[in-house]
Image: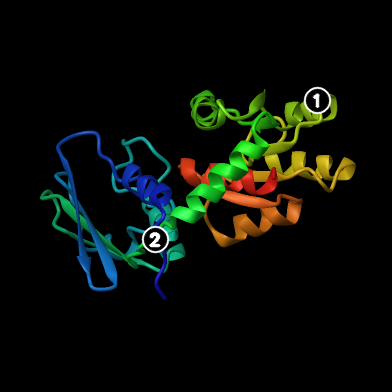
Amino acid sequence: MSMLIDGNRLFQIRSSNSTGKGFVRCAYRIMGDLVAFFVEDSGCGIPKDKIPTIFDRFTKLNTFAQGSGLGLAICKMLIEKMDGSIGVQSEENEGSIFKFTIPYQEIVIETDINDMENNDIKENISAGRTILVAEDVESNFLLLKAIIGKTYNQLHAWNGKEAVELYEKSQPDLILMDIKMPEMDGLEATRIIRQSSQEIPIIALTAFAFDDDRVKALGAGCNDYLTKPLSAVLLKQTIAKYLV
């Protein structure tokens, strides 16, 4: 089965395989309907008798190194979630080469000039409306502000609890709801808001891109679901769709 490659997951996998000393080299190659990634390091290598268990949970070759021994197990889980596979070649004291493959499908997006004009018209019609942005990471909020700030008025909540309070106080026209937030997450905040209104559009924003995360968001009452890093065009199109 061909799947779109999730950039967030790939960055998480790459970050989980960094080492404190020596070098780490990364490369990739398209192989038909697969994309193969290679991560080579100059570390201590892996004893042959440890290779079969290196991807197990809590496996650590160096007890003095920081970490819980979950890094490679998490990588394996993420890759298998994307229908991929991972393996390793290693010699003790000579470093290691990790290779993982993921199904690859090239997508060609054709843009119709009429669609672009329609999106501009929808955005102009909805200009001046108020959007509540629930986002606990300041840099993410500033990015959203840069994308939509000239078109819409904005309110900012730092967590789900503030989002509920601002919604009740200000009655915005649409909510951009981050899912993972302190004090109260976006799913719980959405459920509470839905007790007062079934009409207000709520768009979930999350770094998680698995089907079960999407199902949870929609089940909590979100109208739509966008994954980070956000596409400015897709975000503006989605907002315009609900504010016409």
Dot 1 alpha-carbon crowd within 10 angstroms: few under 14, some 14 to 19, many 20 or more: few
Which quadrant of the figure contains the N terminus? bottom left
Report the front residue among 112 and 241: 112
Disc 1 designates what residue? 170
Task: State which quadrant residue 24 falls in.
Answer: top left
Q: Is residue 140 above or below residue 190?
A: above
Residue 217 against residue 89 in the figure, above or below? above
Find residue 227 and report its horizontal and vertical position in percent: 52, 48
Of the pair 115 and 129, the residue shown nearer to us: 115
Side (left or right) of 208 relative to 242 = left
Residue 189 can be seen, yes or no: yes
Q: Which residue lies most toward the right here?
A: 196
Judge from the rendering whether residue 91 lies leftward or rightward of residue 70; answer left or right.
left
Secondary element under disc 1, as helix, strand or loop, is helix
Residue 50 in percent (x, y) is at 27, 60
Q: Amino acid at mark 1?
A: Ser
Query: Which quadrant of the figure contains the C terminus?
Result: top right
| Mark number displayed over residue 110 | 2
Would you say 226 lies left or right of 8 here? right
The answer to which quarter of the image holds residue 42 is: top left
